[in-house]
Amino acid sequence: MIERIDIVVRLVTCGASLLLLVLLLSGEVRRGLKLPLAGLLVGSIGYLLNSSSQLFNDTPAQPWADLASIFTPYFTWLFALRVFEREPHWVAAWGAAIVLAAAWMIGHFALPHLLIGFYAIHLTGLALVADLFRTAIAGRADDLVEQRRAFRLWLPVLVAAQAGGILAYELVTGEGSAGADPGIQLANALLILALTLFAGKALLRTEPELLLRSENPAAPPTDPPALQLSPSELVLRDKLEAAMNEGLYRTPGLSIAGLADHLGTPEHRLRALINQRLGHRNFSAFLNRYRIAEAKAALADRARVDLPVLTLAMDLGYNSLPPFNRAFRAETGTTPSDYRRQCFGETAGQN
């Protein structure tokens, strides 16, 4: 009975994944998300077939279904990071892909009698799931987009329960899911169905804040006309601007909760104002608007030419130099030191 239910759930999930794949390829999802989301869906189909002892085991196509399935955690990780507007470092992205591909070749063709490929695949997958969980939870407080805040909460929970759970189970038992207890196979299929429905919710509703936004999230927002603000929003905006003009943005470790407490307003109201009215998607981007503007003025100031960049970064509220350098480069396309040299080089040329 359990085996029959498991087959039905897997076939339904495969059909739903194929439908979502068609919608994805023909829809308006932004370009950077199409490849990882397509890989996620194809990998899920491959895993559903490959991990079932009833559907797809010991066939000539099994190694290729396995190749698709082992990349599911990778594409899930890549998709989530891009939704969170955190492009992974190229070393991590290419390194994980190469390890997974090499481990697959070793496990199926080079040294199939050894478990080198098996352990490499599972340890890499677990590392990707752990990094996804860390990124999602760590950045949630800074995120101003309500749909994405919910996404940060539920996606890592589902991924950790399904991908993390099954990877850990297979790592401990030393065998694939196809040989698992029928109850475990069914639970695994149900979790994949839940993940598929979760992705389908975003695709079918075409969540613009998650999937259809511009490819350049760092582009400066344009302030909406004042007439779009309600009286209470106008008052809150004025209080916010007054606090920023007083230099509150220089406070180290300033969070949106701390700023809301300083302004005497509920956090959700402040979050909505900064995101929906002022156009910022992350609280750090909102703070950087003020911090980098002051940094540019200080770096171009002849009276402060000997001020160390590290001192300037600390004065502006950064805890160390690397976050300041990243924020400055994202805003100007250059480093603080190079920006200073450019400013004084242009001045010297004019003289």
Image: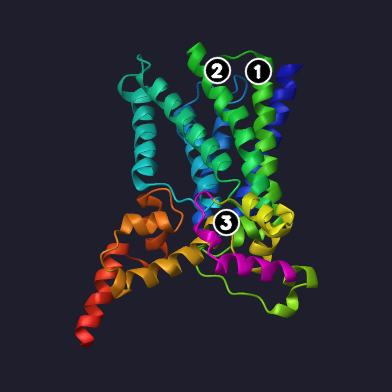
Specify how the rendered protein is coloured: rainbow
Residue on which the image places disc 2: 169
| Mark 2 in CB contact with mark 3 (< 8 angstroms) | no
Label 3: few (<14), some or many (≥20) within 10 Å? some
Amino acid type at mark 2: Tyr
Q: Is residue 179 left or right of residue 233?
A: left
Principal secondary structure, stretch drawn in magenta: helix
10, above or below 82, in the image: above
| Mark 1 in CB contact with mark 2 (< 8 angstroms) | yes
Q: Is residue 326 magenta?
A: no
Discs 2/3, front:
3
Splitting the image into 4 quarters, where does residue 123 fall? top left
Residue 232, can we see it?
yes
Callout 1: helix, strand or loop? helix
Q: CA distance from mark 1 to mark 3?
A: 42 Å
Name which of mark 1 and mark 3 comes first in the sequence: 1
Q: Is residue 92 left or right of residue 338?
A: right
Residue on which the image places disc 1: 184
